[in-house]
Image (cartoon, rainbow, N blue to C red):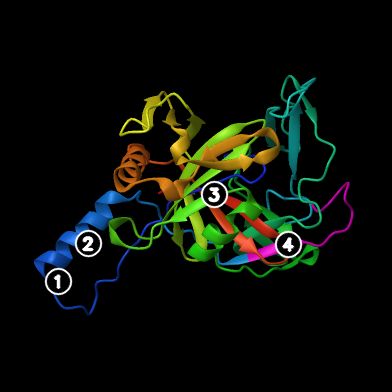
């Protein structure tokens, strides 16, 4: 999985479900509209994260252990880093203590659960919380953490205004669709001088931006594209999608290097439909959720799609 923003990463598509109990039968028009909504967006299960905790242990080198079982004698999680890697994209492996050392990897020296790290709580047992630890590099879904080493942290819901008006603060150019069959879908573009430009599509759901992450959409401005109906192209290669667009659909990304990026607010209805139709082609294996914490900013968490 690609780190959409690497610095943040990210963006996006949750699902809308309706409780039909105790409602009058819908008319033909209502039924058709409901069907369109259901068929036009990526179907994602609602994230189950309701409580979050933050590590309070001050030891930056050791942090607090993430345990396989809810007891002090349990194996703990270790992070192994690719040996002699000089890139920013070194491979990582996560294993429990006692498992064989992976060939070609060295044990990481920094704390996995250092002070300030946030975890979603998915259960508890005695003096331990069961927390989600699934991420882009770790395929282990959960671990236990001592309640004595964490504190509660409040989440602030993400909404359309935050994404559209304050998206630059988190490295995103976003457009949230306000009505119609794509209501609450967010299209966000991120630009990084080293990693280039990427686009993600997500949905605002339960105070989070929910994003399928089994696809990558790389973007590139091509000035030579005619500023007509051909000013926007999207194609598929393997597990990736590529968007080429003309300067007319762009906005300044970084003035000092004269860089530009796609502006989702300039996309027309046909281009939006084409992007959404593209991302619905593949059922996501994982889902990324972006939450906002007033004390720390945005953070990203993962769960397996159902």
Tell whether label 2 touches label 4 (CB within 8 Å). Answer: no
Seen from the viewer's position, the closer of residues 276 and 77 is 276
In terms of image quadrants, where is residue 26? bottom left
Q: Residue furthest left?
A: 28
Q: Secondary structure at mark 2?
A: helix
Q: Residue at x 22, y 55 (%)?
A: 36
On screen, residue 293 above or below 175: below
Tell me which numbered mark, 4 or 1, is placed earlier along the sequence. Answer: 1
* Numbered disc 3: secondary structure: strand
Q: Nearer the viewer, mark 2 or mark 3?
A: 3
Residue 215: where, in percent of width, then height? 45, 35
Residue to which mark 4 is pinned: 54
Give the Cα distance between marks 1 and 3. Answer: 37 Å
> What is the magenta range?
52-64
Tell me the residue that label 2 is attached to: 34
What secondary structure characterizes most of the magenta part?
loop
For label 4, the SS is strand
**Residue to which mark 1 is pinned:** 26
**Mark 3, residue position:** 173
Q: Are marks 4 and 1 in contact (CB under 8 Å)?
A: no
Q: Is residue 105 above or below residue 289?
A: above
Spot occupied by residue 257 in the image (x, y as percentages of width and height):
68, 33
Residue 287 x/y as whole percent:
49, 47
Q: Nearer the viewer, residue 229 or 277?
A: 229
Mark 3 vs mark 4: give the one in front: 3
Q: Quadrant of residue 274?
A: top left
């Amino acid at each position: 999985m690609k780190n959409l923003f690497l610095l943040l990463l990210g963006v996006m598509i949750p699902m809308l479900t309706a409780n039909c109990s105790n409602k009058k039968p819908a008319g033909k028009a209502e039924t058709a509209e409901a069907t369109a909504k259901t068929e036009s967006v990526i179907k994602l299960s609602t994230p189950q994260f309701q409580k979050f905790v933050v590590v309070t242990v001050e030891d930056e080198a050791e942090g607090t252990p993430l345990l396989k079982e809810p007891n002090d004698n349990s194996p703990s999680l270790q992070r192994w880093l690719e040996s002699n890697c000089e890139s920013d994209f070194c491979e990582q492996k996560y294993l429990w203590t006692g498992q064989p050392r992976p060939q070609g990897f060295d044990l990481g020296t920094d704390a996995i659960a250092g002070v300030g790290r946030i975890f979603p709580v998915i259960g508890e047992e005695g003096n331990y919380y069961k927390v989600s630890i699934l991420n882009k590099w770790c395929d282990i879904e959960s671990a236990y953490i001592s309640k004595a080493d964490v504190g509660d942290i409040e989440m602030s819901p993400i909404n359309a205004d935050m994404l559209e008006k304050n998206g630059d603060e988190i490295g995103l150019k976003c457009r949230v669709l306000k009505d119609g069959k794509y209501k609450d879908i967010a299209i966000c573009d991120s630009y990084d001088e080293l990693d280039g430009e990427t686009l993600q599509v997500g949905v605002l759901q339960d105070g989070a931006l929910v994003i399928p992450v089994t696809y990558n959409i790389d973007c590139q401005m091509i000035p030579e594209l005619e500023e007509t109906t051909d000013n926007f192209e999207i194609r598929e290669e393997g597990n990736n999608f590529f968007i080429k667009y003309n300067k007319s659909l762009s906005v300044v990304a970084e003035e000092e290097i004269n860089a530009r990026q796609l502006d989702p607010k300039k996309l027309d209805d046909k281009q939006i439909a084409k992007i959404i139709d593209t991302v619905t082609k593949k059922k996501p294996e994982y889902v990324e959720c972006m939450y906002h914490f007033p004390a720390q900013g945005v953070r990203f968490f993962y769960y397996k799609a159902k």
